Image (tube, rainbow, N blue to C red):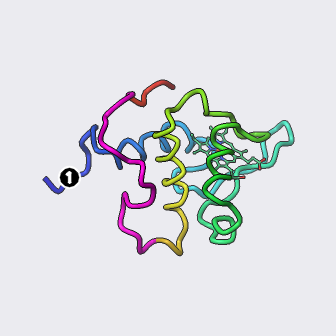
Amino acid sequence: MACKGAPSDPVNEEEDLFHNVCARCHGRDGTGGPPDPLGNPGPKNFTDPVFQRSMTDAQLRNAIENGNRGMPAFGAVFTPKQIDMLVGHVRKFDPSRKAAPAGSSSGASGSDGSAPAQRL
Ligand code: HEC
């Protein structure tokens, strides 16, 4: 009962999305990676509070939806609710926000249970 592994758990879906789709570039721990061979900059370190302060939620969302250089665009891949989750997940890497209770970051994790995530 205290186990968080249920597939319908929204927190779990959020982690699955990040781990399955984003982590190959951003790392499971969100610390980013090196520049790619095409000369695009590598993903930044989400655990850096300076990075977190430099981006608004709208900017994070825009980057995820529309991409940027080495960052693919996911606006057509995920539902707006899933993108909310991903913005929330990026925020969870901020060490200065560790105190916040899990799942409270974006008001959008509702319970309408729409659109399964697995597409990639
Ligand atoms: C193919 C590798 C790749 C994948 C997959 C990827 N990203 Fe990125 N992402 C990048 C790179 C590279 C940048 C930096 C782009 C730049 O600085 O111009 C970036 C930038 C970002 C940014 C903007 C902040 C920054 O670092 O400048 C956010 C937010 C982000 N990614 C979130 C995500 C999320 C969420 C996912 C999963 C849905 C994801 N990324 C998947 C490579 C990737």
The yes-or-no answer for disc 1 within 8 Å of ligand 1 is no
Query: Which residue sits at x=67%, y=34%?
Result: 73
Categorize mark 1 by other alpha carbons within 10 Å: few (<14), some (14-19), many (20+).
Answer: few
Q: Which region shows up in magenta?
A: 98-115
Q: Quadrant of residue 16?
A: top left
Q: Main secondary structure of the magenta part?
A: loop
User: Which quadrant of the picture is home to ligand 1?
Assistant: top right
Residue 54, position in %: x, y? 71, 65
Return the residue found at the far top. Answer: 119
Q: Which residue is mark 1?
A: 3
Q: How many numbered callouts? A: 1
Q: Is residue 94 left or right of residue 40?
A: left
Amino acid type at mark 1: Cys
Q: Tag 1, which secondary structure?
A: loop
Query: Which residue sits at x=42%, y=47%?
Result: 15
Closest to the observer, 21 or 104: 104
Closest to the observer, 102 or 36: 102
Residue 45, position in %: x, y? 66, 60
Residue 120, position in %: x, y? 51, 26
* Residue 99 in magenta stretch: yes
Return the residue found at the far right. Answer: 39
Q: Is residue 110 left or right of residue 68?
A: left
* Residue 104 in magenta stretch: yes
Residue 39, position in %: x, y? 86, 42
Q: Where is 61 relative to 29, above or below?
A: above
Q: Is residue 26 left or right of residue 18?
A: right
Closest to the observer, 99 or 16: 99
Query: Which residue sits at x=60%, y=27%?
Result: 76
Q: Where is 77 relative to 11, above or below?
A: above
